[in-house]
Amino acid sequence: MNVVDRQTQLRRWVMPSSEFEKDKQDRALRMVKSAVEAWPAFKGVSYTIYAKGSYANNTNVRLDSDVDIAVQNRECLYYDYHACERASGEVTSPYAGEWTPSRWRAEILAALKSKFPGEVSGSGTVAITIDEHDGTRPDIDVVPSFAFVRYDSSDKSSRHDGSKVFPLSGMSIVNYPDQQLERGAAKNGRTNGRYKKFVRALKSAENQLVADGTISDLPSYFMECLVWNVPDRTLLSGEDLSAGFQSVLVWLWDHVKEETYVRTDWEEPNGLKYLFHGGSKWTPADARGLVLATWQYLDY
C-alpha cells in the first residue's frame, strides 16, 4: 500500500455515520421508546431510555450503524461504596418491589416483541436484539438496566451515577455512559477532532482484519478504550491522517509490546474503571495483535 492509498483508506475509515444512517439510528431510538411507553406493565413506572455506546458517542463507523439503547429502571437503586466504608449508623432498607432483574428483562422483551413481531431475540446474555428492517432502521441492541451509584466517600458527598446490568450469565456489569460521553467529547475537543477520528479508524481496521480472518472479533468499545489512553499530544502529532494514525499505533505498540508487562493504569473512557484489571473482556495480548495487524495491513 503506497502513501496515497493509505491516506485514501484512512479518509474512509475515519468517516462517521452518514446523514441517512443517523436518521435510521434516531428512528430506532424513537421506536424503542414508543414500544416501552405503550406497554401496560410500565404504566406509572419510573424509567429512562437513552442511547449509549458508539451511536451516542459518535464513534461508530460508516456502514456499521447498529444502535445500543438502555432501558433503565429507576424504581430501585443499586449502589456500592468504592475504597471507603458505609457511614456508621446508616440504615437502609432493601428493595422489596416487583422489579427484579428477571422481571424487568421479561417485560421489556414482551414490549419489544409486541412492537416488532418476529424480529426480536432475547437469547443474548446481555442485550435483547432487534433485527434491521428494510433499510429503515439498523440492528438494535436493547439493554435492560437499573440505576446505580458509586459512592467514593462515606458521607456520599462524592458519587458517580451509572448503570447496572444483569446478564443471563449471572455476573452483573456496571457502566458509566454519562461520564464516557462527557470525557470523550472533552478529549475530542482538545485534539481537534482527532480522538474520535482515530477511534473510528481503529474500529474500521478491526472490522477489516476480522473480515479477512487475520484476527478474532473484538468488542467495539475496546478500540475506543485503547485510543482513549493515547496522550493528547500524540493524537495531535503528524501533519496528516496517515502520519497521525501512525503515531497512535507506535505509541500503543510501545506500551503493549512486552508480553510480560501488564498495564495497570490504563482507564476506560469513563475514567472510573481500569482497562486491564481482572474480569476484563480483553487483554494486552488482544491489543498487541490488533495494533500489529493494523500496522501490517496499512504497510507502514
Image (tube, rainbow, N blue to C red):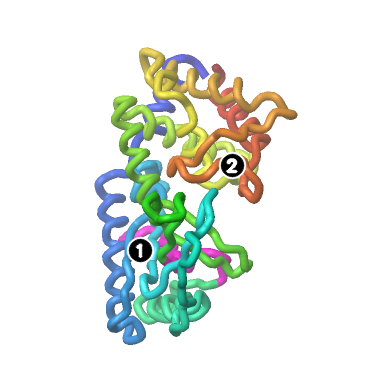
Comparing 281 with 295, the one in front is 281
SS class of the residue under badge 1? loop
Among the two numbered marks 1 and 2 on one chain, the one whose residue lies closer to the N terminus: 1
Comparing 162 with 34, the one in front is 162
Residue highlighted by disc 2:
210
Looking at the picture, how far across and down is residue 264, in whole percent?
61, 35
**Amino acid at pointer 2:** Val
Looking at the picture, how far across and down is residue 21, in whole percent?
31, 50
Residue at x 46%, y 76% (from the top left corner): 93
Looking at the picture, how far across and down is residue 161, in whole percent?
39, 56
Local crowd size for mark 1, using a 10 Å CA cut-off: few (<14), some (14–19), many (≥20): few
| 1 vs 2, front mark | 2
Residue at x 42%, y 17% (from the top left corner): 4
Residue highlighted by disc 1:
134
- The quadrant in which the C terminus is found is top right
Visible residue check, residue 20: yes
Outermost residue to the right: 260
Measure the C-alpha gap from mark 1 to mark 2: 26 Å
**Amino acid at pointer 1:** Asp
Question: Above or below — where is 195 with respect to 112?
Answer: above
Q: Is residue 297 magenta?
A: no
The magenta stretch is 123-146
Q: Is residue 277 left or right of 238 when viewed as pictured?
A: right
SS class of the residue under badge 2? helix
Question: Above or below — where is 5 with respect to 101?
Answer: above
Q: Is residue 275 left or right of 177 when viewed as pictured?
A: right
Local crowd size for mark 2, using a 10 Å CA cut-off: few (<14), some (14–19), many (≥20): some
Visible residue check, residue 7: no
Comparing 240 with 45, the one in front is 45
Q: Is residue 136 magenta?
A: yes
Marker disc for residue 266: none
Classify residue 61 by image quadrant: top left
